[in-house]
Image (spheres, grey):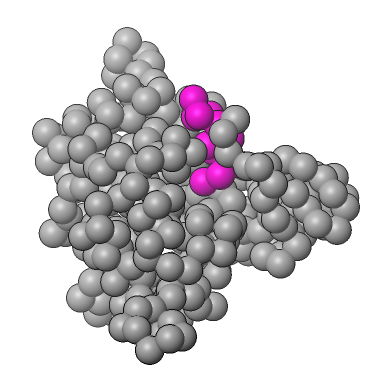
Amino acid sequence: MGVVVAEIAGPTPATSPVAQTIDLLGDRVTVAVLRDAFVDHVRRFSEWIDRTGAPPAILTSRLTALVEAGLMRRCPQSGGYDRHDYMLTDLGLATWEFLVSVWCWQREWAADGLLQPELVHVQCGHRGPPELICGHCDRVVKARDVRVQVNLESLALAGKGNWRRSTRNAPALSRADLQFTDVMEAIGDRWSVLVAGLALSGVRRFGEFQSILKISPTTLTERLTRLSEVQMIARTAGGREYTMTPRGRALFPIFAFQLAWTQQAHPDVPVEDLGPRLHHDECGNWFQPALRCRGCDMTLERTSVTFHS
C-alpha cells in the first residue's frame, strides 16, 4: 500500500463527505444502534435503552442524527401514541459490510471478542469471518495490495473544525459486546482515522504525517500515542518510525468499507471530492471492496448472512 498525492483542480466542497462518515459511524452508541437494528431487528427507543444502557438524551441525539443522515426513518407506532419505530433505510442497510468488518475485528482482536455472535453464511452454513476481496477481479485484497490517492485539499477539509469525541469518556454501554472500546480509538474521530489510514498506506515518519495532514505536532503526537497504547501502531527504528501492527492492519476492511459507503451516501459529489480513494493495482481498477465466504467462495450479500449467539 502506498500514497499518491493527487493535485485535483476545481472547487472544493464546503464539507468533507468522508469526515461526515467518520463523525457518524465513529461513535460507539451509533454503531451499537445499527448493530442491534441489523442483527436483532431492534426498532424501538425503549429496546435500545434496555439493551445498550445509553443515557436517553444521548440515544435520542444518535437516532436523530441517523434519521437526518438518511440511514433511518421514523414510522408511527400503532395505537395512536406519539411514539415511533426506527426503521433502517436502504442507505442504513448499506452499512452492513462496515458492521461486519467491525464485528470481524472485535471477534479476533478485542478482549471481549468471544462475546460477539458468530457470522453464519446461510447458503452453506459456514461460520466465521469472511475474506475481503476486490469486486472487480475477485482476488483477496490486503492493505499492501492497494494504493491510496489523496487530495491534500480534501484531507485538510476532513480535519477542519474537527471536534474530538473522547472514546475514553464516552458513555458506557450495558452490554460488553457493544463496547467497541479499542476499535473506536482508531475510528472514533477524524484525526485518528486519517492517521491510522496513512499508517496503513505505508506512511511511517512523524514529519510525513504532519506534511500530508497539516496537523499540529501536539495533536499528531496525541493520536500516535493513543494508537500505540492500544497496540495498533508500534514505534520502530529507534523510535523514529511508526508501523502498523497485525492488530492495526486488521482495520483495513473497516476503512475500505467506510470509503465505499461514503460514495453511496453522497452520489452527487464528484468522486475526486469524496476523500481518499483506493486503487487496486493488480487489476488496474479503483478498489471496490466486497466480502467472500471462506467456506464456499461465494460473494456475500446482506440477505445471505445472519448472526448466531
Query: In the rendering, at what x and y percent does residue 176 appear?
Result: 44, 35
Residue 151 visible at all: no
Q: Main secondary structure of the magenta part?
A: helix
Front-most of residues 278 and 113 = 113
Query: In the rendering, at what x and y percent does residue 78 appear?
Result: 46, 85
On-image quarter of the C terminus: top right
**Whether residue 232 is situated above or below residue 72 in the rendered picture:** above
Q: Residue at 82% across / 45% down in the picture?
A: 126
Magenta residue check for 195: no
In this view, which residue lies farthest toward the top?
238
Front-most of residues 133 and 214 = 133
Would you identify the image quadrant in which residue 22 lies? bottom left
Q: Residue at 31% across / 83% down in the picture?
A: 82
In this view, which residue lies farthest toward the bottom?
80
Query: In the rendering, at what x and y percent does residue 70 appear?
Result: 40, 78
Front-most of residues 146 and 38 = 38
Q: Residue at 69% across / 46% down in the picture?
A: 308
The residue range painted magenta reads 102-113
Residue 79 visible at all: yes
**Whether residue 86 is situated above or below residue 248 in the rendered picture:** below
Front-most of residues 156 and 295 = 295
Query: In the rendering, at what x and y percent does residue 292 appear?
Result: 75, 53
Would you identify the image quadrant in which residue 114 lies? top right
Left or right: 270 as drawn, with respect to 105: left
Left or right: 162 as drawn, with respect to 140: left
Count of labels shown?
Answer: 0
**Whether residue 290 is situated above or below residue 308 in the rendered picture:** below
Left or right: 163 as drawn, with respect to 281: left
Left or right: 146 as drawn, with respect to 14: right
